[in-house]
């Protein structure tokens, strides 16, 4: 392999000559051959790195800390990184030095070498742009990486997750109106209960998702605080006055999101409670999606020997041995995704508890798991809406049969004859295999006219009296 020799504070490093990264990135590649995930992060993180480096350069120039010539070169390189021109130059895996120093230096080196190329210099020469002295000016990994974490997570939540979940919620709202009059058998404790409509059930699912959207949005307030300007331990050493405010203002303008300087920069780099809170809200969303997916696949179970009250789209054959079998695969995929999100949240919660003194060094694993959860939930919600919920429809014949067979319709008689007599009617019908009506008339507790007037499934789906 054709290589160039670079030097850093530890000595010489052989770097592939055609690569834009430098000595520290190369050392990381060699020292941390652990895991295959290349920051699942990927594009969101690389974009966020470009944003921070571009805005830091502009802020440095604005505060008189970087010449216009150097600023222009750095901004040009950072913009290309943001736009995805050089993603292949970010090869590092998730598991690396804990504060993300290697990934920060990866960005510094790539942008510096791009700037050097623009200026007609030699790759790896650090002239006229140095990765530390110029691209990383007024910064430390300890404030850059938390800022990248927040930017990447906030952008993905705003642009991918929330629209996807909102579309699923809206689809359930449409179903709630479409099937408002379809009276079904309610169930509690996996046992028959009083009637409910499919529209009411769908509205409950929509409300769960609406609440989850609200909760995720609430955690964005913490993500909108950026640590940039804190430098190494939160004091802002080596950053000029006004740098943090300028950098954050520029980042907010670049992203269109309301980022602000962290209220307390010591907390911003020594703990990652905002990311932990975000992960917790994603876990709550996953719990709602798990419940909804399980409800739907139970309602669709069978189709002849299960509950069988819903028809789901036939997306693909379901068995390699049983011809004609079709499985609720979108529900199954959703539940698998939610299990993974639960696991991701456990990792984030534990990592978030492990800060020591002025730094939490679990940044990479926190970012990886939060973005993984966001990506999975966004994709699963979109697929679930398109390939399952959109085509969901009631099996009216089975629904009507189940409602008619239900013993719990007897609940409508309780206000008229009392709980004890109503229970005796249900028990008699169950024991003798008769209908509620026959049992009620046999026991003499009501007349036929009274039974027909009082026991009406449609009227039981709302308040009475």
Image: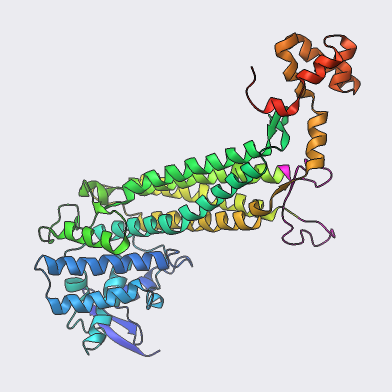
Q: Quadrant of the N terminus?
A: bottom left
> x and y percent of residue 337 in the render?
57, 53
Magenta residues, as a range?
299-326
Is residue 312 inside the magenta stretch? yes
Indicate the quadrant where residue 365 lies: bottom left
Residue 412 on image: x %, y %: 73, 19
Q: Is residue 328 above or below residue 75?
A: above
Above or below 5: residue 183: above
User: For the point 39% across and 49% down, which residue is it?
Assistant: 351
Q: Where's residue 12, x and y in %?
A: 26, 81
Determine whether, in the image, residue 338 is placed left or right of residue 62: right
Please identify the quarter of the rendering in which residue 445 is found: top right
Q: How is the protein colored in the picture?
A: rainbow
Image quarter where the C terminus lies is top right
* Residue at the spot 84% in from the left edge and 16% down from the top edge: 449
Quarter of the view holding residue 152:
bottom left
186 relative to 281, above or below: above
Q: Where residue 311 sits: x, y (%)?
A: 75, 49
Q: Is residue 272 above or below residue 23?
A: above
Q: Is residue 281 left or right of residue 304?
A: left
Magenta segment includes 254: no
Q: Residue at x 19, y 58 (%)?
A: 231
Q: Main SS type for the magenta part?
A: loop
Residue 336 visible in the snapshot: yes
């Amino acid at each position: 392999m054709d290589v160039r020799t670079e030097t850093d504070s530890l000595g010489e490093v052989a770097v592939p000559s055609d690569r834009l990264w430098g000595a520290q990135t190369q050392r990381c590649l060699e020292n941390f051959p652990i895991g295959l995930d290349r920051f699942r992060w990927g594009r969101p993180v690389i974009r966020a790195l470009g944003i921070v480096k571009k805005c830091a350069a502009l802020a440095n120039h604005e505060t008189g800390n970087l010449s216009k010539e150097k600023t222009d070169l750095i901004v040009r390189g950072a913009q290309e990184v943001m736009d995805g021109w050089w993603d292949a130059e970010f090869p590092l895996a998730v598991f690396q030095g804990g504060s993300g120093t290697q990934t920060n230096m990866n960005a510094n080196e790539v942008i510096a070498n791009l700037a050097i190329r623009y200026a007609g210099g030699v790759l790896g020469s650090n002239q006229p742009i140095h990765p530390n002295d110029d691209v990383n000016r007024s910064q430390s990994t300890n404030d850059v990486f938390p800022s990248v974490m927040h930017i990447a997570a906030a952008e993905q939540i705003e642009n991918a997750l929330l629209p996807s979940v909102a579309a699923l919620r809206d689809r359930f709202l449409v179903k709630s109106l479409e099937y408002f009059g379809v009276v079904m058998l309610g169930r509690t404790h996996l046992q028959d209960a009083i009637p409910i409509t499919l529209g009411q059930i769908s509205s409950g699912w929509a409300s769960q998702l609406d609440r989850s959207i609200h909760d995720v949005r609430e955690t964005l307030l913490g993500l909108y605080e950026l640590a940039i300007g804190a430098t190494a331990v939160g004091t802002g050493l080596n950053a000029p006055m006004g740098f943090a405010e300028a950098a954050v203002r520029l980042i907010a303008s670049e992203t269109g999101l309301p980022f602000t300087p962290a209220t307390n920069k010591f907390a911003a780099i020594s703990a990652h409670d905002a990311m932990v809170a975000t992960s917790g809200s994603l876990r709550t969303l996953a719990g709602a999606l798990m419940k909804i997916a399980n409800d739907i696949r139970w309602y669709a179970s069978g189709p002849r020997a299960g509950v069988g009250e819903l028809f789901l789209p036939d997306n693909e054959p379901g068995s390699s041995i049983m011809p004609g079998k079709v499985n609720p695969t979108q529900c199954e995929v959703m539940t698998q995704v939610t299990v993974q999100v639960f696991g991701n949240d456990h990792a984030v919660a534990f990592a978030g508890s492990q800060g020591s003194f002025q730094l939490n060094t679990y940044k990479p694993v926190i970012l990886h798991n939060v973005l993984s959860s966001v990506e999975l939930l966004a994709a699963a919600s979109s697929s679930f809406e398109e390939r399952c919920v959109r085509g969901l429809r009631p099996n009216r014949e089975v629904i009507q049969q189940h409602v008619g067979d239900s013993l719990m319709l007897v609940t409508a008689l309780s206000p008229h004859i009392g709980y004890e007599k109503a229970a005796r009617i249900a028990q008699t019908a169950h024991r003798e295999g008769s209908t509620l009506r026959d049992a009620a008339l046999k026991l003499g507790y009501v007349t036929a006219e009274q039974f027909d007037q009082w026991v009406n499934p449609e009227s039981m789906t709302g308040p009475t009296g």
